[in-house]
Structure formats: C-alpha cells, structure tokens
Amino acid sequence: MSGKRGKSKSEGFRLKGRVWIEGREGTFLGYGRVVLLERIKQFGSISEAAKSMNMSYRHAWELVDSMNRQVKNPLVETATGGKGGGGARLTEAGEKAIEAFWKLYRDFNEFLEKTDKSIKFT
C-alpha cells in the first residue's frame, strides 16, 4: 500500500479521566454530587435542584443523605414543610466541600493535560 497516511495513529489519542472522593459508603463526592450541592444552594430546595438536573427527588435525596452520613458536619440541612414551606440549605461544611472538590478537579485536569503532552505511542 502506498501513499500518504496523514496523521500517525497515536496523534489522535487524548488522556481522559474522572476524579471522585471515596468514603466509607462508596462515593462521597464527585462531579454530579457537587453540581447537586450547588443547585441546592441556588434553589434552596432538593426538589428544585433535582428537577434542574433531570433527576428524581428520591435519587437526589439519597445522594444528599449519603454525603451527610459520611461526614461529621452535614453538607446540607433540611427544613420540613409547613406554613412557611420546607427547604434545604448548604452548610459551611457544604461550601467548603464544593470549594475543595473544584480545586481537586482543576488540579486533576491540569495533571491530565500536562501528562497528555508527554504520552507517545510510536
């Protein structure tokens, strides 16, 4: 076979990865859970946060409950309904968890970009 082949096969590769934090129950914090926490902060409601992510309330509640069970200080506090209605709010621990995760996420992606440039399959 003759002729130009164009790019070498290895030039099309990219290093990819995902990062999350494991706890005693499995996943403690990851990309989706952090987005859920941010939406709870934005909407003041687990239900509204779940809707904004096309997630069932039950699943969102299970994620919040799992995160809260795995830490000393809860990330989300809830208030039951009633005359003033219920709601949810992020705690200081929740704010710190979001900040810490996004730093980890940025650092991880910088590592992937740096390492990606050094990988050769020739």
Image (tube, helix red, strand yellow):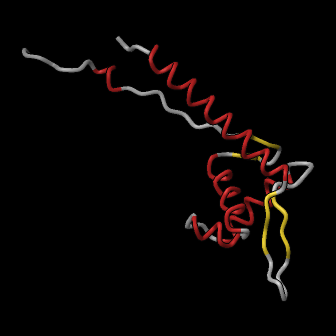
Front residue of 23/48: it is 48
For this view, does 43 lie left or right of residue 85? left
State the image quarter where residue 81 is shown. bottom right
Above or below residue 82? Residue 61 is above
Identify the residue shown where x is 78% and y is 49%.
Answer: 95
Image quadrant holding the N terminus, namely top left
Identify the residue shown where x is 68% and y is 68%.
Answer: 43
Above or below residue 79? Residue 26 is above
State the image quarter where residue 90 is shown. bottom right
The x, y position of residue 62, in whole percent, is 74, 63
For this view, does 41 lie left or right of residue 10? right
Above or below residue 88? Residue 63 is above
The x, y position of residue 44, in whole percent, is 73, 68
For this view, does 7 lie left or right of residue 109? left
Image quadrant holding the C terminus, namely top left
Front residue of 75/71: it is 75
Can you name the residue that lies furthest to the bottom here?
83
Identify the residue shown where x is 53% and y is 26%.
Answer: 112
Front residue of 77/65: it is 77
Identify the residue shown where x is 75% and y is 40%.
Answer: 22
Can you name the residue that lies furthest to the left here?
2
